[in-house]
Amino acid sequence: MLKRRVAAIALSCLLTGATAVQAATRPYRIDDLLDLRTLGPTVIDPSQRWLVIATTAPWSQAPRYDLDWATFEALGELALVDLNAPGPPRPLLSPEPGVGYVAGPFSPSGEKMVVFRLRGHTREIGVVALATGKAQWLGLEVEPAPWGRSAQWRGDDELLAIVRPPGAASRGLGYGWQVQDRLLTLWASAARGEAAVTALGAGRYAPMNPRLKGERLVALTVSSGAVRDLVDGEIIDLEIAPGGRVAAVVVEGETIAVTAADAVTPSTPWRRRRLKLVDLASGDIRDPLPHADLLPTSLVWSPDGRRLLAFARPDGRDWASGSLHEIDAQGVARDLAAAAVTPSLTTARDGQVTVRAGFAADQVVVFGGRAAGAATDAPAWRRLEGDLVGAPDAARLEVNDPSGGIFVSGEGVVRLGPTGAPQRLAGSGFRLQRPSEPAIGVRPQLTPTAGGPLCCALLSASALRLGHRALPLKAGEALLAYAPAHGMAVIEEHEPSGVSTVTLRTSHGDRPLLTLNPQLAQIDRPTVQAINHIGPGGEALTSWLYRPAHAPLDERLPVIIVPYPGSIYAAPPAMAQPQYPQFSASIQAMVGEGYAVIAPSLPLPAEAEPGAALAKSMLEIVDKAAETGGLDANRVVVWGQSFGGYAALLAATQSERFSAVVASAPVSDLASFWAAVPPQVSLIAEPGLPVAALAGWAESGQGRMLGPPWRDPERWRRNSPLWAAQRIKAPVMLIQGDIDADPSQSAMMFQALARQNKDAVWLTYHGEGHVVIGPGNLRDLYSRAFAFLADSLAATPPMREGAPP
């Protein structure tokens, strides 16, 4: 293999005249993954003077690895560019050893920015003056909540933030160090002979479950450092009205009892969400909907700050029984159930419910049908009186401001002004681009930015347009941010090697700002080939074959298929790009080891069983790829993570053609996974105790069992690899983190294989969650996995030329 690669490189140099430097490439290795830098939010302040670029340091340089995915925060770096006099980016904050920074929202003037500092296990909120870089750390812990707001400016000197007690149970950090810390504390108590117990309850014992104490909403005066308490409770979101007089706050309330007959989804709420209105001058708190459960994603203030839209359901009812409410700044609510239009509810596969409603100038607009008895009930964008507004049915209301609203869909961009007449701003292929896409802590939808008849640029695949000014975009370029006042755009361009460049573009030319991962230019680029095939429903699909760059086309390589049921890849998947930090089942690492790798498109219809004909679908793709040559369809490995690990095990029960199986964080038995309570829930129960935490996944998420186990036991059994373990012939490697949601899934499958004296390896990585992320553990994992595959494939002779699979 090595001799062939060297010969291929030499031949390539001879034919193309490539220099020795260009030819000095090498295979991708795990350390290349650990050395990747990533690009975070790239944002421009409201005054359009300051550009802030967020990046991460290489993964191998993290100060600690017990933060789970918050490790990216610990690696966070922020750089600043003055757009009045553009130059190379400079650090926004002075680097501190072991400290990572995350960008928050800008102040209204753009002079300041909220920043979050992650040091050790503590997140602290601060404010930095952009002109000087002087930071003011406020001594308060705030989580940069990605599901809503945790901090928002009321004015240039006042900031509202949801603060937490030091070391409080965390919705984010609870998946890392907190589980370990609490276990160690309990074990130490037990060692001393003291009580060491976790007590949880259900039914009439539910009140015994712990609740988060000490969380509160505060107003911070930046200049003086004064802190004013506003609301106590488990607060998950806030939204200040334009003008800054009132804030809408979402607080978690009572536990919602779930019965056996209820449909459970991954997004089933386990607590009611209560709406509070806070008068920010007097501190008065009002309860406009005291007996209603709020849909948090529905909060929208009118441009003048006098009215709030919120969708809520009566306590104990489902979302279909809910209605839209209009609430004034004094907390007086008007139920809009009697309006001429009824909002249409959209329910995602994970059970998340959304409504589409907002304001166009001072008019309430709703996506819904006419009330019963009207001429039509077809869903469409309408005013409360039922009149159509002229926006496409598939449109999103992305901006509402005093000038009206802007709707965006695949059909184009439409503005609805105060007069009510729709104006078509752009046709299909265009979308809006705000001058700065939101940072963490900024609500992305319905956010006015620069005002005027058109607050945002119009973006197509080839150009950025604002009024009569346009900047070109080339294929492969992504627009990150735009400053209309300067006629500048911030562009990211990815080279095929994975090297990316961030550039400041004007009508006069480009100015490079930074280059990420230049080392990738020295690494072999796999050849990528589209494999067109027909899916189980007769649909045309594309899967993607990756081969080592210098492998001769006549060399029949062993092939690894990396499944994830439900994934359809119209283009090569992002996870397979060399610059993507793919820790589990890394396609780049597999190709670097000399394997051909297939990323298969495996559609999963809504009502289909997840295990239906999995092996058949995978192997048909392998055989189709083998028709093009260059891989051995007789030496096939299946390697999957999470739901892909489940698919790998189940496929191995359905066919004897697999030479080896690698299943990382798999589900082996759907019923026991349904019943499991993750340690992040049982030990870190304060943020909310969904007793059936994994039931929603199994019943209506990816598991698709369509009900609890007793409803259709055979469906659960035939889709669980454990119950067909006797059919597995291939050697199996099981990979598991010990603080994953249910580590027993790997233990059960290993027990089943060992009981039959089948070839199996079980790796448990300690201190790891659902994905192994520690550098030492990752190096060990891939070293062991590739050795396991080499050993397994050595027992499978290469297929003869022309031999049928």
Image (cartoon, helix red, strand yellow):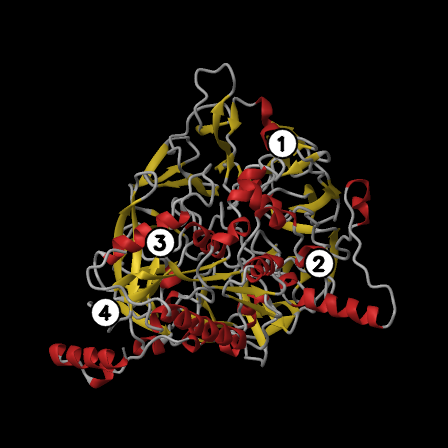
| Amino acid type at mark 2 | Ile
- Which residue ends up furthest to the left in the rendered image? 15
Element under disc 1: loop
Tell me which amino acid carries mark 1: Asp
CA gap, disc 3 and disc 2: 37 Å
Tell me, yes or no, whether the two marked residues, 1 and 4, touch with CB atoms within 8 Å. Answer: no
> Is the C-beta separation of discs 1 and 3 under 8 Å?
no
Give how far apart the Cα atoms at labels 1 and 2 are. 28 Å
Q: Which mark is residue 318?
A: 1
Residue name at image x 20 percent, y 67 percent: 553
Q: Earlier in the sequence, mark 3 or mark 2?
A: 3
Nearer the observer: mark 1 or 3; the answer is 3
Say if mark 3 contacts mark 4, CB within 8 Å. Answer: no
The image shows a total of numbered marks equal to 4
Query: Relative to the observer, which residue lies in front, 585 or 127?
Result: 585
**How many other residues sit within 10 Å of disc 1, few (<14), some (14-19) or many (≥20)?**
few
Question: Which callout, 1 or 2, points at the residue further toward the start of the chain?
Answer: 1
**Cα distance, mark 3 to mark 4?**
22 Å
Q: Which residue corresponds to mark 4? A: 555
Instruction: State the residue lying farthest toward the front.
Output: 757
Image quarter where the C terminus lies is bottom left
Q: Nearer the viewer, mark 4 or mark 2?
A: 4
Residue 684, which numbered label? 2
Looking at the image, residue 694 sits to the left or right of residue 401; the answer is right
